[in-house]
Amino acid sequence: MASAATGAAKPGLLLLRRTDATFTAALRARFRVLDFYASGEPLRAFLTAAAAEPDPPRAALVVAGGAILVDAAFLDAVPSLGCVVTTGAGVDHVDLAQCAGRGVVVAGAGEIYSVDVADHAVGLLIGVLRRLAAADRYVRAGLWPAQGDYRLTSKLSGKRVGIIGLGSIGSQIAKRLQAFGCAVSYHSRAPKASVPYRYFPDVHALAADSDALIVACALNDATRRIVGRRVLDALGPDGVLVNIARGGNVDEQELVAALQDGRIAGAGLDVFQNEPHVPPELRDMDNAVLTAHEAVFTEESRADLQELMIGNLEAFFAGKPLLTPVLRP
């Protein structure tokens, strides 16, 4: 990519996520980077200092997941901002109404993560059904020769799988499950005419008709804790829950209780309510497979993401349309 700053002063960029040396160098080659994590300052002081610069930053690159909220207070602190680029597929950490009211455009990660997250979701589902993590610990502990073969597990092939949210990620998950011979159903805001899967307007009914339930929806007011006790009980004692969306989509306390009480059979979780803190009860369960919000991250997706983020920033500074807009002018 050509530099956005050729022949002129580099435009200012607020960097509000940790980056590796390669990405940092690519950003600094194009932009005047004000790095929050390198500054060592509290967020409010960092933003205040940035806003007071002679040429205050007009764009911000922010981490997804809620570590930093782009809300009214954030935007008040840096009124020069005209663009927010987030590295997440979801934008629950960005107040889109506040951005729209101030003429701030927003770009997200688009569909760049969809394939990797779908792979991870199916991997978690297989991991729970076949108890791969627990079986690994069984072998490593030397229990195989001492206690014999590990307990029987359950296959994925032929299972009824419900997907909450049939967007880009949910659709990729469904395609993979079809290859396993699964009967796929889904819930979303409205049925999609172009898909062959059965639609459920109610999540409770979807869970009751599923052997496994995968959460793949955005986090908003309508989907916060969309999986609670009633849905978990409908999934039943042989059912499995997988969440690769956001921790807030699931009532975590109710999930812990359902796993402890045997009201569901297991869970595969990549996201949690209060990351990076995971309830100790989950960490001690053999019927839970846990990963560190890593479904989106592979060597391939990281390189693609970096190129996309820079492309969005360069488009904004050049007065061109964003590559993956969430909120247009």
Image (cartoon, rainbow, N blue to C red):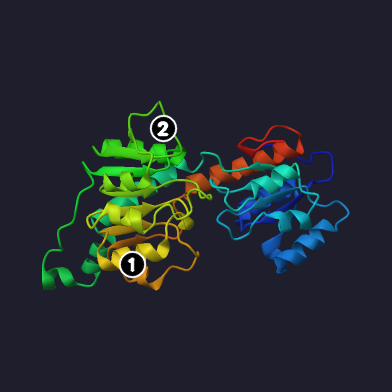
Taking the spot 31% from the left edge, 48% from the top edge, the residue there is 207
Q: Between 231 and 119, which is closer to the camera in this rendering?
A: 231
Is residue 16 among what the camera can see?
yes
Amino acid beneath label 2? Pro
Taking the spot 70% from the left edge, 50% from the top edge, the residue there is 60
Left or right, residue 281 beside residue 72: left
Instruction: Return the residue at label 2.
Output: 191
Left or right, residue 291 beside residue 1: left
Taking the spot 74% from the left edge, 65% from the top edge, the residue there is 44
Where is residue 251 drawn, in percent x and y?
42, 60
Query: Is 268 above or below relative to 31?
Result: below
Where is residue 294 drawn, in percent x and y?
46, 55
Query: Is 61 above or below relative to 260?
Result: above
Left or right, residue 130 beside residue 58: left
Q: Residue furthest top?
A: 194
Amino acid beneath label 1? Ala
Q: Secondary structure at mark 1?
A: helix
Query: Is 276 above or below relative to 180?
Result: below
Left or right, residue 218 beside residue 93: left
Residue 47 is labelled as: none
Where residue 18 sits, quadrant-wise, is bottom right
Instruction: Return the residue at label 1.
Output: 257
Is residue 127 among what the camera can see?
no
Where is residue 237 drawn, in percent x and y?
23, 58
Q: Secondary structure at mark 2?
A: loop
Q: Looking at the image, is mark 1 or mark 2 earlier in the sequence?
A: 2
